[in-house]
Each structure stands twice: as structure tokens, then as C-alpha cells.
Image (cartoon, rainbow, N blue to C red):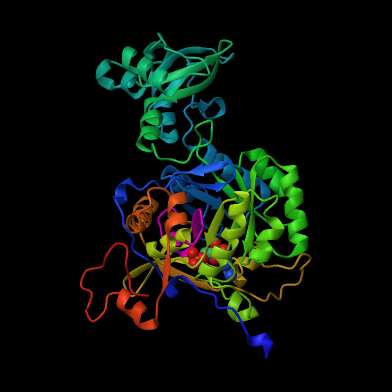
Amino acid sequence: SEKLQVPEALTFDDVLLRPKESRVEPDEADVSTRVSKNVELNAPVLSAAMDTVTESDLAIALAREGGLGVLHQNMDAEEMAAEIERVKRADELVIRREDVVTARPEQTISDVDAMMAHEGVSGAPVVDDDDEVLGIISNTDIRPYLGVNEDDLVEEAMTDEVITAGPDVEAREALDLMYDHKVERIPIVEDGKLDGLVTMQSILERREHDDAARDENGELVVGVAVGPFDVERAETADEAGADVVFIDCAHAHNLNVIDSAREIRETIDADVVVGNVGTKEAAEEVVDFADGIKVGIGPGSICTTRVVTGAGMPQITAVAEVADVAAEYDVPVIADGGIRYSGDAAKAIAAGADAVMLGSYFAGTDEAPGRVITVDGKKYKQYRGMGSVGAMQSGGGERYLKEEQEDEEFVPEGVEAATPYKGSVASELHQLVGGIQSGMGYVGAETIPAYKERAEFVRVSQAGQTEGHPHDVMITDEAPNYSPQ
Ligand code: RVP
């Protein structure tokens, strides 16, 4: 039957990168990329919008390493806005007025000491009723050996010659002021009132992350998932400062979803990434308005879409098909799901993706939500599909729900699972990005665009695949980037 004259579709284990002539040293390979038309990253890595993967903690950690966290949508709109703001403000140079811990001149030393300990700060501007800065009190001002007593008043112990700056102060300038005057914090004053605070600690912390992915104001970038029909939520996310809004849909070739995505694109300022798709036909429908296209129908580690529905596309073919279409319009492509090893990420990018999105890889990190559980002496963290019964019952399964679904009898497309506990996002990302860079070295590509252009694949047999993993040995020491599946 003609029906069965079918094309072949390939995934990660079916292919390998053909090694090529190279002068590229892996650690010199430039992994900066675009995730959408207007958002650049310094590492081509996104964390999945799943309720066991990305909340603000992970988004902050990942953006500090150059990638992008995509907040999940299993929370109400207000909470989502607060989470976005937490990421945007995490590395802020100027702490905003409402977040600055202040002291009052008539407070006692013991009182202010307890307050600073409680708030976790080591100093505070002292303000009067009009919010005018009268001085600064810090831990060093209230040491008992300075002759300060518990019942003394703040105004007696504070430093009253305060170095201040205006709201437009830059990091370099603030640091110079701090060194010149031997102070660690500079109140920002506007129209005679306290307007914020710059601390030495925040400047030095920022410096530690000079590869962080930042917006044009120097704040960390953040993405957020919204349901395909939730225009209002997309607007809330936009207003809260999200850089990229991800239309979170398991099948974005649904024309109702595309209509709605188009409306969202027209309504908000943030970039809009449309997904997931898995074919060139779907890509053609969205490529004229999407700021990025996300690819993945069924490759996810916790995903049962292919088993439950019989539909799906092996991921390497899906990425390559979509990338061919997207390249003509210069729209970035994100390969989402199925990445187990850094080599899979390297292959996804070689096939045409500008960046990769991972769920299970990050679900085991410290920064992912959820606690560590121990089974037979091994540590794990919970990881579940957003189309699993658990995630859908707690409201996050919008991605998999029908538009008007109200009954509780879900047809799940995901499972609830556990994934090995791993440590910090920073160390995981170091392995992942290092593997991608080494892949670029093997192919002789200095940049991601060059890599996509230059990479060629070979087809691998089952025997070839066996050969590629450690074989005929007993592994005695676990490698940080390999564990047998
Ligand atoms: P993985 O990295 O293989 O764990 O895959 C993560 C991806 O799986 C997510 O980014 C999402 O596209 C997909 N996903 C999330 N939930 C489900 C599901 O319940 N089927 N699938």
C-alpha cells in the first residue's frame, strides 16, 4: 500500500556527528546564541517549563550561567508575576526603596541589631519621617567594644556623614565611591528622599557572573509558559517583565492555538515562542509571526504522548525539518525534550537548533522545586510530566487539556517519576556546555551558526551505538557526565 511507503525519521541515537578538520579548541568555541528574535543567551540552554523543574530559583541560577529558565504555569497569575519579578530583580544593582531595610534614629541598638539579624542585612540607612537619609548604621557601628550600649539610640551610634548617589549610578562609579570612602553601601537619594541602596556585595556578586544572560538594563532574562488561549496571562507576564513568553502547547499545529498565538504576538511586547511543533508544515504556519519556534512532539523522558496517542516525531528529524523552514525567516529554533547526555544537545544544535530545552537534566538539581528523597541509599528528586495525572490535577496540565475540558477524567500523556539528585545547576551546566563545545571542536566550528552550517551526520547502527557507550568493562568510578541508561 502507498500508505506504507513512509519516510524515515531519526533521533539522537540514530546519528553521530562526522568528525571534521578543525583548529577550534573546545574552550574557545563560542556558545552564545539567540533563543528568540530579540533575546540573546551566552549558553544555548533552557530549562523546561515544568512544575518540578523551573521556578525562580532555577531561573536565576541558569540565567547567571548564561541560559534561560522558563517558569512553569502551574501557579496563579499573581504568583507568576511575582516569580518573574524575583528573577528580574535578583541581580539588580540598586535595591529598590521598598526592599531596603531602614532604621529609625530613635530605635535602640539592641532593637536595630535584632532587626538587621532578622532581615539578613549587615547595615541599614537611617531615615526620618520624610524618608530623608540621616545616617547609616551597620554592624561595625554597634560592636560592644566601641562603647555602645544596648539601650543607646541609633542616632548616637550611626555614621552621619553619608555618601549617596543618584538613581542613575553605574556599577563602576558606585564601586569607586565605596573604595574612596571606605564604605560598603551607598544610599540612592532622589529629591532628598531615600530611593534605593547599592551594596558592595551586590556589585561583587554580579561580577562573578559576567557570562550571565541579561537584558538591556543588565537584569537577568527570564521566560514564562502560558496556556495557548490565555491572552490575559500573557499580558500579565509581559507587564511583569518577562523577556520571552512561551506558548505552552503539546500540539501547536492546532489551528486554534495558532490563531491565539498570533493574537498574543500582536498584543504583547515580549518575544513569543510558539510550540511545540514537529514538522515543516507546522513550522510554515507559524514562522511568519513567531519570534522563536520550539520543537518536540513526544521525545520527553516523562512523556507518553507517542505511546498513548500513536503520534510523534523522532527528535533529530523534527528539529532538522523545522530548522530548514525557520532558517529562511531567520527565526531561532529550540529543541525541546529527550536530551539525556551533552552529546544529545550537541546533535540537536548540529541538526539546526539554536538552543536546547531540558527537563529531567535539571529536575535533579538543588535549585529545582521539590525535596530530595532517598531510596535504598540513593538520592532522588521528584520529576513529573506536565501531562501526568498529578500535574493536571494541580492545574498545570493546561498544555495537554482540551480547550474547554472540565471533567476530572484526564487522559494523561505523561508519568510521575523520580530523577537522580545531582547538585547545583552551575555544575550541571558546566558539563552540558563543555560537551557542546567539545562537539564544536570535533566539527571545527567556532560559533553556533557555523556549527549548524558545518555539521554533518552519519547514520549509526545498533552495533555502532553499543560501541559508543562504555562496553565490556565494569565502571568503577562514576563520571560527572555519564551514567548508564
Ligand atoms: P526531558 O528533558 O526529556 O525530560 O523533556 C522535557 C520536555 O518534555 C518538556 O520541556 C516538555 O516539552 C515535555 N513534557 C513536559 N511534560 C510532558 C508530559 O507530561 N508529556 N512532556
Q: Nearer the viewer, residue 482 or 136?
A: 482
* Quarter of the figure with the N terminus: bottom right
Q: Where is residue 290 shown, x and y percent of the image?
A: 67, 51
Where, by quadrant of the figure, is residue 438 drawn? bottom left
Give percent across and percent down for residue 323.
57, 59
The residue closer to the viewer here, 484 or 351, is 351
Q: Quadrant of the C terminus?
A: bottom left
9 over 89 or under it: above or below: below
Residues drawn in magenta: 351-367
- Residue 438 versus residue 291 in the image, above or below: below
The residue lying furthest to the bottom in this view is 1
Q: Is residue 298 left or right of residue 287?
A: left
Query: In x, y percent, where is residue 260?
Result: 76, 55
Residue 11 in view, yes or no: yes
Q: Nearer the viewer, residue 208 or 379?
A: 208
Q: Specify whether residue 107 is in view.
A: no
Answer above or below: position of 476 versus 463.
above
